[in-house]
Image (tube, rainbow, N blue to C red):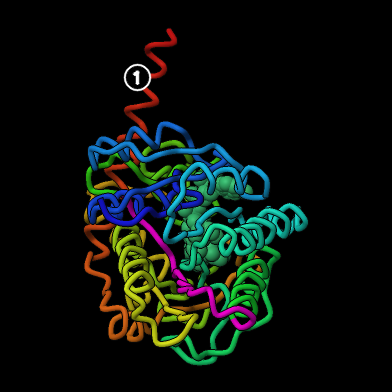
Amino acid sequence: MMAKILVTGGTGYIGSHTVVELQKEGFEVIIVDNLSNSNIDVLNGIEKISGIRPAFENIDCVDYVSMDRMFEKYPGIEAIIHFAASKAVGESVEKPLLYYRNNLVSLINLLQLMPIHKVKNFVFSSSCTVYGQPDELPVTEKAPIKPALSPYGNTKQIGEEVIQDTIHSNSFYKSIILRYFNPIGAHPSAEIGELPNGVPNNLLPFVTQTAIGLRKELKVFGEDYNTPDGTCIRDYINVVDLAKAHVISVKRLLEEKGESPVEIFNLGTGRGLSVLEIIQTFEKVNDVKVPYQIVGRREGDIEQVWANPSHANNVLGWKAQETVEDTLKTAWTWEKRLAKLREEKKQTEE
Ligand code: NAD
Ligand code: WQD
């Protein structure tokens, strides 16, 4: 068994896929999650794929005392991957204090507890949202940070600064900050995937839920953007590819290969796709219809953004492998699996 890794938010969407990849590489995983946006059954899915049930603690990262006890219960944790955060952009506009408290206090607690428990290494989930609408595309890590468009986005910008300042003040810590573009898809086994709470805000869960008939039609937000087909462009990255980048980052930290105490990497494919391209490709590869209607723009949307992933490609030795076609197939297989589970639940209740 290799090093012990703490994964906060490990029953969430990206966290659960990362736990599986860590286990595959022999790491021992401890998950801390308060299940505010995930389900305990995710542990069954992880166990089915890897054959190992990770240690799990239902703790709120905002609770310093409980986190302190957790570190005492699992001595020898060597690295933390910190996924735990609230992530709904719209909700963050309505409830900014909830977002600042949850996302920033959790982070500060971990950074305070790390030296006490001799944990040096920290991987942080950041987002391409820090770039806003970049002046140049594809966007590199050197692009300026633009004023955040939401409290959620601001928590990522402030989070990055909190990490930078902490490391600047104390050479004990080492960190890798990962800026994700748009994660989509599910594990090919369809044992784990995205579990959106209520009406999805993100494009892919809305596409799959519309295709399966849970939603009448998808609303495409705007077709008058300055893009080839008028709809917004994003860099959609396969969630398993994304998970693998975390394993590489943890290894880099443990092996002390970093070129500086804090390193920042874009995690994207380097390819931008429009909303209409996503819908059309989804329909084609899955042979299913996605009824949609073009409506007005969504407030706060960025017109177009995609990554220059060269830094991650060259320095981390990580590259997105999966095609968007295969990724969209996994998203559809997962949605069908969820439908089957709903049906089975209904039958046992009757
Ligand atoms: P998710 O909501 O599926 O996972 C987050 C997990 O953290 C959930 O299981 C939730 O229950 C848990 N959690 C939240 N607050 C907690 C707390 N205070 N204590 C303990 N557990 C807590 O989200 P995700 O899509 O897997 O995102 C993971 C991380 O990646 C987040 O930090 C998010 O901001 C970031 N990110 C996500 C995306 C995306 O599009 N999904 C893009 C860029 C960055
Ligand atoms: C993608 C495209 C929409 C839904 C958000 C956060 C960002 C990051 C990723 C965490 C856009 C269009 C969507 C729909 C649509 N998260 N769309 N109809 O906006 O790139 O980013 O998630 O850090 O911070 O802001 O992702 O999936 O919401 O939208 O037309 O019902 O799909 O307008 O162009 P986005 P998204």
Q: Residue at x 24, y 52 (%)?
A: 26
Residue 328 visible (yes or no): no
289 and 334: which is toward the camera = 334
Q: Which residue is mark 1?
A: 344
**Which class describes the residues within 10 Å of circle 1: few (<14), some (14-19), or many (20+)?**
few
Bounds of the magenta segment? 168-186
Q: Which residue shows up at 45% across the image and 69% down it?
A: 180
Quarter-of-image position of residue 265: bottom left
Q: Quadrant of residue 228?
A: bottom left
Where is the C terminus found, in terms of image quarters?
Answer: top left
Residue 326, above or below 62: below
As for residue 165 lying within the magenta part, the answer is no
* View extreme (top): residue: 350
Q: Which of 299/185 is in front?
A: 185
Does 85 sit left or right of 43 as displayed?
right
Within the magenta stretch, is there residue 169?
A: yes
Front residue of 136/227: it is 136
- Above or below, 334 against 341 in this view is below
Q: Amino acid at mark 1?
A: Glu
Residue 269 x/y as whole percent? 32, 74
Please indicate whether residue 206 sits to the left or right of residue 130 in the image.
Answer: left
Q: Is residue 212 left or right of residue 295?
A: left
Q: Quadrant of residue 153?
A: bottom right
Residue 1's x, y, as percent?
A: 25, 50
Q: Is mark 1 within 8 Å of ligand 1?
A: no
Tell me residue 149's x, y (percent). 67, 72
> What element does badge 1 sit on?
helix
